Amino acid sequence: MPDIITVQNLTKQYGDFTAVDGINFSVRQGETFGILGPNGAGKTTTLEMVEGLKQITNGSAVLDGHDVKTEPRMVKSLIGVQLQASSFFDGLNLKELVETFAALYGRTVDALALLREVQLEEKRKSQVKELSGGQKQRLSIAMALVNDPKVLFLDEPTTGLDPQARRNLWELIESIKAKGKTIVLTTHYMEEAEVLCDRVAIMDHAKIIALDTPINLIKQSGVGSTLEFHVDRAVALELVWALPGVDRVTNADHGFTMLTTDPEQTLPALFNLEQRERFKLYNLQLRQATLEDVFLKSTGHSLRE
Amino acid sequence: MNTTVKLTSSSIKMFVRNRQAVFFTLFVPIIIMTIFGLIGFDSVAKIDVGLVTGTPSPPTQQFVDRLQGISAFDVTMGNEPDERRALEQGDRSVVFVIPDALMPAGESQPVQQTVKALVNVGEQQQAQTAISVVRQVLDKTNLAVVGAPELFAVATEEVNSRNLKYIDFLLPGIVALAIMQMSVFSTAFIFVDYKEKGILKRLLATPMKPYQFVTANVVTRLLVAVVQAVILIAVGVFAFKAHVIGSLWLLLPAVVLGGIMFLGLGFAISGVARTVEAVPAIANLVVFPMLFLGGTFFPLEIMPTWLQGIVQYLPLTYLSDALREVMRNGGGWAAINYDLAWMTAWSVVLVSLANLTFGFEEKRV
């Protein structure tokens, strides 16, 4: 797939403060690209520069062949934007709101069809203030779709939502993705990035510190998986240590916790050991390394602080 | 559909559905008009007269009754010390002390009697009026007693001329005031709210040009100003019997120009105010002096000269003056072009100011 967004040496400077420090990335057509990082890492600023909402101090952002710096209005007509905590006019119902926003692009839309797509059709006569948090976010996505954009930008779409509403919104985003839209989203939820994104850029202190698919990021980080189990009788620690891929083992009584870089090798060997040494495994648990672990390892601090 | 047209129709819907805006746009001016209309500054204030009597003879009592019946007097009866005190406290303009046997009774030769008048020095004019009325009543009685015929009479005939009343002064002022309040407050509140909620930023993320959104809102409010003027004038004419003499069409340029002028002020304020809470403080600081001094409730002429020298240049003064020239005095273009010229100048100043302070983008460091 060709690249639809190319960002080169993108920099945002507020006086002495560098909010975004010379970052590079590109987004492929049809993929869901995530920018992951803690608050204040520069995610939103990056997004808003690419959207043409913030002046670019240095570097460039090109979207579908149009330079954001020189053709901001053209770029704006090609993208759909959901801002962090964006709200909409009071005094108009949802249908009227969608139609008004379509007019901003010089378009007319089938407002009801669009509201149906985000499961808000039955709310078409309601006003924004009557909606729940999740409904507001869905409306805001509908608004970002009024111009049938080539790229959809979502800035922390699920922040502040309860788990149910969050899953609901993930489904909506997946369904939009299934229609072939390119989506760029920011999040500080690891799980969200892992579930939704084809590729993830990890941002910290104004820089991108890693960029790959979630799986590769986890693999390349060398952060292993954690394997936990109990045994029914005493097993020598050395035997467990000797299993392939094992990094570290601790045990207390009959409980073992071990770190493995290669669970696909370690697990079968563990089962063989069980057969050979005639003990029984209880409560076997394998916990995959997550982006959370990757982030912790590569930045030295946790994502939420 | 054309973006600006659609935005305008949406903006009109939003304005009309905003109960608060409608309340302040129409009901508040009508309430103010009602209050000031009911106070009725037209009726000349009555003269506070105190009457001191002892035990008057029947003819004297008749004389006292006649005085009490005089509509220009607000009569209080009492004893002399009480009435003196009331006079000293400024509650009376004049106090008459009436002897018991003021009026001649029976056939006996009348003796000259004296009515003592205690005059409030601070209200000479009212006191003198009251004294001359009392003297007139006494003269008549005098003539009747000596049996002289009445040689002169004044016949009054009521002619309904252009009988300008306070409401005729008030109505144009209320219309001007209402346009100012609507233009300044609805703009400042709503745009600061849009800014605070990130709505303006969201609009900037579309290819729309900011002037399209501003135009839609300005057109909406100018239409509201015209509707406002029509409704308030109708209420004034039908409910308060105000007279509108001049051409209503001539009001249109004044209303529109006044609207533009105050919308400029509203946008300038929404550029300065960072939060919705700050709007009333800033807006009232500018609007309040004009509300009282801009020729809304009373004419500039009653103010001290130095103050007139300042207030004649207030934007609201020009608008209320232009409306009054047309509505009350039946003036034509010639009567208002001076006001219109000044309003144009103010519009240029205020709209430029708005351009300086107001922007769609958050002003961040």
Image (spheres, rainbow, N blue to C red):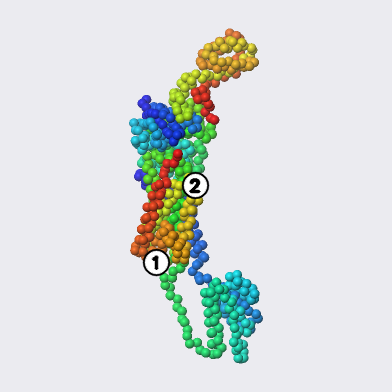
Which residue is depicted at the point 43% across and 75% down?
B159
Q: Mark 1 and mark 2 in contact (Cβ < 8 Å)? A: no
Mark 1 neighbour class, 10 Å CA radius: few under 14, some 14 to 19, many 20 or more: some
Q: Chain of mark 1?
A: B
Q: Position of residue A83 (x, y in %)?
A: 45, 37
Task: Find disc 1 in the rendering and name its residue.
Answer: B329
Q: Quadrant of residue B98?
A: bottom right
Q: Nearer the viewer, residue A211 or A234?
A: A211
Check the residue under mark 2 and report the chain it is in.
B
Name the side, left or right, on which B137 lies relative to B261.
right
Image quadrant occupied by the C terminus of chain A: top right
Provide residue B284's location: percent of width, then percent of height: 49, 53
Lower position in the chain sequence, tag 2 or tag 1: 2
Question: Can residue A110 be seen by looking at this rendering?
Answer: no
Can you tell which mark lies on residue B276?
2
Considering depth in this image, is A137 or A225 the residue closer to the camera? A225
SS class, disc 1: loop
Q: Residues within 10 Å of mark 2 (few under 14, many from 20)?
A: some
Check disc 2 and give the amino acid type.
Val
